[in-house]
Amino acid sequence: MTDPLIIEPNHTADACVIWLHGLGADRYDFLPVAEALQESLHSTRFVLPQAPTRAVTINGGYAMPSWYNIIAMNPARAIDQGQLEASAQMLCGLIEEQQASGIQPERIFIAGFSQGGAVALHTAYISWKGPLGGVLALSTYAPTFDDQVQLAASQQRIPALCLHGQNDEVVINAMGRSAYEYLKGWGVDAAWREYPMGHQVLPQEIADIGEWLAQRLH
């Protein structure tokens, strides 16, 4: 297992964002974003984990960094649930490491793009049983959200910012919107933002994320 990339802030860290990359990317993918956000979040550490390399069925079995195998795209994505849960447990371990380093759980945020966002949502609202500062869900979906899910009180108090491209051709806008609607239905303080983009990240989106984080870290 490759160690996460850890970007320490200029000041002593009293908050942390753990950010998961998307399918086929690596732990350096969001390094520029982390560095940009630290320009205003002066005491926030960023932890960028690396997904294991494994065969991905929808990509012809080609091995690439992947938080879980995607077996089929239609009608709904068929995924390897065990691998998703293993990735969520890895993320829980990183949260616990940050707590052990002295950061309060209410100041620990988890973020993820695309497949990484699916792991972040699953972790926050299904696997992790304690408080968290919030979730950033970028261009993603929630394959494990359904009408059977019941949130604990601590999970219900975890806010979420869901961000999506209007023209996303990989994770269609409606899939992201569905995850957001589940969160709202469960009483979560969730916000929805969409942008004139495809499956990507825009500077305005990062600015909005920085503002959202700053409001919770003042």
Image (cartoon, rainbow, N blue to C red):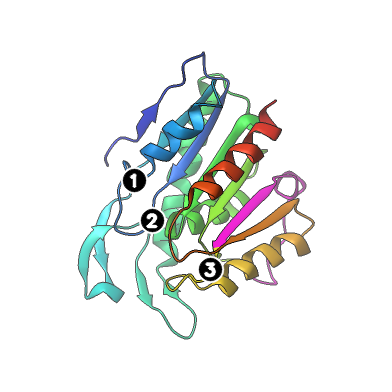
State the separation of the CA atoms marked 3 and 2.
15 Å
Q: Is residue 122 magenta?
A: no
The one of 107 and 93 positioned closer to us in this rendering = 107
Q: Residue 97 at x, y = what percent?
A: 48, 29
Quadrant (top left/top right/bottom left/bottom right) for the N terminus = top left
The part of the chain drawn in magenta is: 146-164
Q: Residue 194 at x, y = what percent?
A: 60, 61
Which residue does the image show at 75% across and 45% down from the upper left?
157
Residue bearing mark 1: 29
Residue bearing mark 3: 143
Look at the picture and state if 206 lies above or below 38: below
Circles 1 and 2: CB distance less than 8 Å?
yes
**Local crowd at mark 3 within 10 Å, few (<14), some, or many (≥20)?**
some
Q: Which label sits in the foreground, 3 or 2?
A: 2
The one of 60 and 214 positioned closer to us in this rendering = 214
Q: Which label sits in the foreground, 3 or 1?
A: 1
The one of 122 and 213 positioned closer to us in this rendering = 213
For mark 2, give the secondary structure: loop
Task: Indicate left or right for 130 with 116 as reference.
Answer: right
Residue type for callout 1: Asp
Residue type for callout 3: Pro
- Mark number, residue 22: 2
